[in-house]
Amino acid sequence: METLRQLADLLKERNMLDAMISEIISRPALQGHLGEYISSRIFDVSLNSNANQKGIDGVFNSGPLEGQTVNIKYYGKRENILDINPKGVPDYYLVLTGPKVQSASSRGQTRPFIIANIYLFDAQPLITTLQSRGIHIGIATSVINELWDRAEIYPSSSSNLPIDDHCRNMIALFKQK
């Protein structure tokens, strides 16, 4: 009974924090919405007014991708999977992740909200490559390491979305301490 009471108290505190976060981001304090909000501020993305448009979260407002649509993902750990909705494909997938992990049980582990890496996938070539390899497109689509490495824009950059020092400083706010 005591651990249940302790859990209930912690969840009440968490609910208060979630309410404060929701006031800032104007959406429920869910990981996906947090990733979208953070990305919109760092990469100058106008988010759609409603959060239920299939496959497209917003549009880049400036830079080399100005006017291009984007689907933003946040994953607490990089597990080489990407949710792809084949009925709503954007121009790009912008994926924020925690650290890369080896497959293992999640028992006893946590998934703190941190940003260790950011990836930018050009959607159509990604889907074409995956389909040519016989990979099913949908929820939890398996993406090989090589494609993740090519798409990385933070902390190292091998992509077409350069990250300046100002953006790096904003991303650093969400790094693991």
Image (cartoon, grey):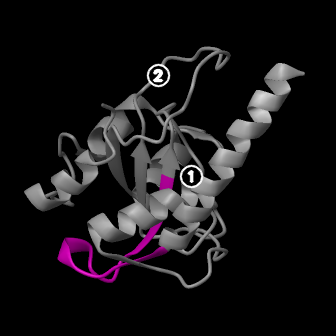
Residue 159 bears which disc, if any?
Answer: none
Closest to the camera, between mark 1 and mark 2, is 1
N-terminal of the pair, mark 1 or mark 2, is: 1
| Amino acid at circle 1 | Gln
| Amino acid at circle 2 | Val
Please say if 47 is above or below 18.
below
Q: Which residue is mark 1?
A: 31
Q: Which residue is mark 2?
A: 101
Where residue 91 sits in the image (x, y, percent)? Answer: 42, 70
Please say if 46 is above or below 122.
below
Q: Secondary structure at mark 1?
A: helix
**Residue at x-position 56% and y-position 85%:** 49
Mark 2 is surrounded, within 10 Å at the Cα level, by few (under 14), some (14 to 19) or many (20 or more) other residues, namely few
Residue span colored magenta: 58-73
Where residue 42 sits in the image (x, y, percent)? Answer: 28, 64
Asked if residue 124 shows in the view, the reply is no
Task: Determine if the magenta segment contains residue 152.
Answer: no
Residue in the foreground of this view, choosing between 152 and 129: 152
Task: Determine if the magenta segment contains residue 71.
Answer: yes
Q: Secondary structure at mark 2?
A: loop
**Residue at x-position 18% and y-position 75%:** 63
Residue in the foreground of this view, choosing between 27 and 46: 27
Q: Which quarter shows the N terminus?
A: top right
Q: Is residue 177 left or right of residue 47?
A: left
